[in-house]
Amino acid sequence: MSTTVTPELLEALRRRVGGIVMLPGDPGYDEARLVWNGMIDRYPIAVVRAATVGDIGPVIEFAADTGLPLAVRGGGHNVAGNGTTDGGIVLDLGSLNFVEVDAPTSTVRVEGGATLAHVDAATTIHDLAVPLGVVSGTGVAGLTLGGGLGWLTRAHGLTADNLLSAEVVTAEGRTVRASAEENPDLFWGIRGGGGNFGVVAYFTFRAHPLPAEVYAGNLVYSPEHWTGALAAWEAWTRDLPDEMQSIVSVLVPPASWELGDEHVMLVGFAWASPDKEEGARVAGLLRDAAPPDGAVVAPTPWTAWQSGMDELFPKGSRAYWKNAAFDRLDAEVIDVLVRRATEQTWTGTAFDIHHMGGAFARVPADATPFPARDARFWLNVYGFWADPGDDRERTAFVRGLAQDMAPFATGGQYVNFMGREDVHDWHAQAAAVYGPEKLERLVALKRRYDPANLFRLNHNIPPG
Ligand code: FAD
């Protein structure tokens, strides 16, 4: 039951926080209500831009007291649009982006609103890196809480696998530490269970040695070579050192990439080791098996590599995503992927295939809620486009490709690669993501930390 929100009540909220409280009509409100996905067009009652982590507790309390929906926003990149809400409160942590690197212990403390760019910029000067995602404006918070796939997944695991501890503000407004030693149940839940259990004020990560310049690049294939390239890539991925991470993408590149205006397949790779000659040798095996039509490969500054895809995904892009873990990439599966990929003709992407395994696969299945540790590949069917008039057609494309791949899916889904759906049964949806056993554990945790489901604007784990 929600309280009527009066101007006095909002004035009281303003007095309780150090950050700016933006109401409809205020300067900045129209920008502040928006998130990265331009299809999400919502009007919150207020957006609170936290000035310090001390603002988190009062906003949680305000939402609990009034019964208003509470959207927590880190980087605002969530494709389902969970960083904003109609008729509720947005807690925007975007100004809380402090990053502290302790080089001697290779640990990195990160405030709850930092983006990947903030972390990479701070770590690379120490020749260190935390495994993160591949687009620099993404929020560390959402990325970590859902899992975190990127160019270091095979070398060092998910972002969540490298979390050492977190300071979490709970639904009761208490700050608790979660780590292997303190509140280990909560620590388990936040490494894949999303923002269901509280607001993370600080994350502490383990960082790994990585040269400031990495051997990385893209092999470019035109459509007539896609079938052969995918078959060769599948064979190549069977026996790769963990240091080699590769992601296959089909996309129509932006003009500035000078790759033409037709769709291409890119086999992107990054070699997470200082031994560039060995990286070139390993990449050369694929080049020999499937000679590319073009290649852009060179030692590249890590921060440039991490932001190299940014231009393709400007804020306000319209997006709808689906994903699946799968093991087979034989002729039948390749046929499906190639047939669908040739339909993609607009600037943006058709799909990514992440090669899994390595350190990711060595984390025991029950160590985190993240599903399908044994999957060889993860498919992200991700549509991006600019014109609202294309919404129906582009969304249908994503659904169609995901549907055709469904027979090959091995189970489990990645919450961070899920778009907005009209979900009628959250329990069933969460079961499809995590599987019944992990879901049972997550529900027990939710009952303990958020029995009233205050944190429900997410891929929700219902307590009841
Ligand atoms: P937000 O919308 O701010 O938040 C996402 C979710 O986390 C919401 O439910 C929110 O309530 C919750 N949340 C946010 N901050 C906090 C906090 N401090 N405490 C508690 N809960 C919080 N994923 C990958 O794994 N690898 C990639 O390479 C990758 N690339 C991407 C590229 C683009 C262009 C986009 C749009 C997304 C990408 N993603 C990737 C997906 C991304 O991980 C998710 O969209 C993720 O939810 C983004 O986190 P955020 O903090 O930016 O989002």
Image (cartoon, helix red, strand yellow):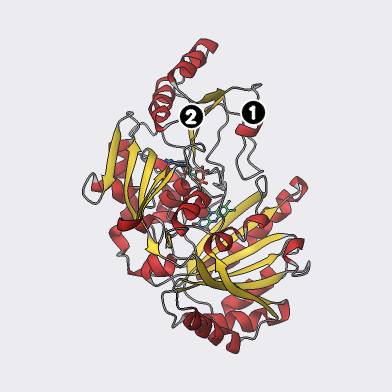
240 left or right of 230 in image = left
* Image quarter of residue 436: bottom left
Q: Quadrant of the N terminus?
A: top left
Say few, some or many: other residues with alpha carbon within 10 Å of mark 1 (under 14 / 14 to 19 / 20 or more). few
Say few, some or many: other residues with alpha carbon within 10 Å of mark 2 (under 14 / 14 to 19 / 20 or more). many
Q: Quadrant of the C terminus?
A: top left
* Residue 331 seen: no
> Which residue is tagged 2?
69
* Image quarter of residue 335: bottom right
> Which residue is tagged 1?
28
Q: CA distance from mark 1 to mark 2?
A: 21 Å
Image x and y of residue 265, in percent = 66, 72
Q: Say which of 194 and 335 sits in front.
A: 194
- Amino acid type indicated by mark 1: Gly
Residue at image location 54% in from the left, 46% down from the top? 78
Residue at image location 68% in from the left, 73% down from the top? 339
Image marks 1 and 2: residues in contact by CB distance under 8 Å? no
- Amino acid type indicated by mark 2: Pro
Instruction: First in sequence, mark 1 or 2: give its number.
Output: 1
Q: What secondary structure is marked by label 2?
A: loop
